[in-house]
Amino acid sequence: MGTAAGARAQHGTVTRQELAALPEATSPVTPLRTRLAAFVITLGGLLFGYDTGVIAGALPYMSRDAQEGGLGLTPATEGLVTSSLLVGAAFGALGSGRFSDRYGRRRTLLVLAVVFLLGAVGTAVAPNVSVMVLARVVLGLAVGGASATVPVFLAELAPRESRGSYVAVDQLMIVTGQLLAYTVNAVLANTVDSPDTWRYMLVVASVPAVALWLGMHLPETSRWYAAKARYGEALTTLRRTRPAGHDAVGELLEMTRVVDAEAATHRVGRRDLRVPWVRRLLVVGIGIAVIQQVSGVNTIMYYAPTLLELTGLATDAALTATIANGVVSVVAAVIGLRVVRRVRRRSMLLVGQAGILLSLLALSLVFATGVEPALRAGEVPAAAASYTVLAFMLVFLLFQQAALSPVTWVMLSEIFPLRLRGLGMGIAVFLHWCVNAAISFAFPVLVDSFGGAAAFLVFAVINIGAIVFAWRLVPETSGRSLEQLEEDFRRRYA
């Protein structure tokens, strides 16, 4: 930077006077419309939602024989096609964490926009299962990268008092992307009579990918600049993203204290994950990320039409009914967006888990009493059973999207220390996607072998363990700045 603050950045504590003396402290800046910026950033979440949701509508068509325009999927290859994206997502999350720590959150999203585009086009033109799996892995790299990068970008961009709402917007955009996918699926299924209908479903994802790339004319986050000792740029970004009269120098000074504390104990990296307080936070972060998946949410988001077909609905009717899942998810995410600012994070987590557990038990009961007896008798289950299954899916999604999912991503964006934020988020989200992949691959095989009642009962039992973990180990993160949280965790878990 060529200033005293820049010269001392690597050798000692920077003072308020030095920060206030930076040229950036008095030069005029153009305010950034942070809500618009958050919308652009969360296009990554929209793509995440669309690309994970669209497969629900494409699978019934892809399962048809090649002569009918499909890929001839079996239950095993159906699980492989679905989970291949999630395997890519696991490695995309892991790699993007280190990439965003080194090169910045903005550059990471620019790269991911290109990968989203390549993956969407690749899946749409895939001639066989092998190419489809490869293209889905590529698409998954972008999905996983976005899932790890977007919440961190939003958390570091937002003021302390609205951080929860900003990060929760990402969850709203994810479920909006899923609703968009379900709607596109249903519209195409009911209006396009073509063996390539599923290809049209998949290629639509290229449009928001281009929009994300074009819209990323945003500054890097002030916390990333501070971690790189680029204090002048950090101060400029703070002044652009905070209201008039805000003490930007004081907020930057708080960031520099955390940077200095980390520098005093050496840079946090892979070798330092054995430090007790860092290791404890990593375990908690992984637990939070895994809890969101073992709820079984993506068995519903990916396989809802397949499950509804199993209860007796026709393909077109099942795809249309699935729109209800998307609508409820969006409404619930809006509720979560409002609630996350008013309710403590840990309480939201536990309430969401309790509602999900009851919903899973109800789904298991309906399959055991209303669906599977008819199937064993060679009959079509009663329509009432189909709509009861759909109703409990909607109750499940209400608790998932209004409580569990938004608080998961908010807490993940909060608990990791500044210099570990990208790496820690990447590791946690890597395992999040690994669990998602395992569940998504196993679920159709599990339902085919043992039935829906047993499958949902297994998830209910797993969720009891997840509730115990959250009750015993997950800390509260509401109401404090990221720097205050880091200092508290360092003292508490040292």
Image: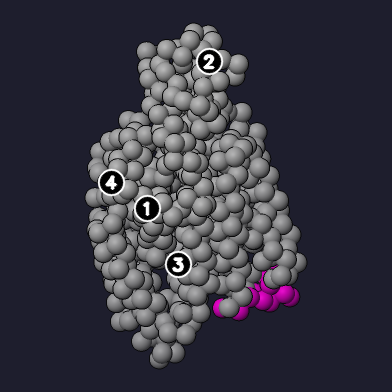
- Residue 415, percent from left and from top: 38, 45
In 3D space, how far apart are the residues under numbered discs 2 and 1 (Cα atoms)?
35 Å
Check disc 1 and report the residue beneath it.
276
Magenta residue check for 124: no
The CA span between labels 2 and 4 is 34 Å
Q: Earlier in the sequence, mark 2 or mark 1?
A: 2
Q: Residue at x 51, y 57 (%)?
A: 430
Lower position in the chain sequence, tag 2 or tag 3: 2
Q: Residues within 10 Å of mark 4 (few under 14, many from 20)?
A: few
> Which colour assignment does the render follow?
one colour
The verdict on residue 71 being magenta is yes
Q: Earlier in the sequence, mark 3 or mark 1?
A: 1
Check residue 71 in the rendering and tell me which mark sits there, or answer none. Answer: none
Secondary structure beneath label 2: helix
What is the secondary structure assignment of the residue under circle 4?
helix
Q: Earlier in the sequence, mark 4 or mark 1?
A: 1
Give the total of numbered labels.
Answer: 4
Q: Cα distance, mark 4 to mark 1?
A: 10 Å
- Disc 3 from disc 4: Cα separation: 37 Å
Which amino acid type corresponds to the residue marked 3 in the rendered image? Thr
Check if mark 2's residue and mark 3's residue have beta carbons within 8 Å: no
Circle nearer the viewer, 2 or 3: 2
Q: CA distance from mark 2 to mark 3?
A: 56 Å
First to last magenta residue range = 64-75
Q: Secondary structure at mark 1?
A: helix
Q: Quadrant of the N terminus?
A: top right
| Residue to which mark 4 is pinned | 492
Q: Whole-percent x and y of residue 432? A: 47, 59
What amino acid is found at the position of numbered circle 4 in the picture?
Arg
Q: Which residue is mark 2?
A: 4
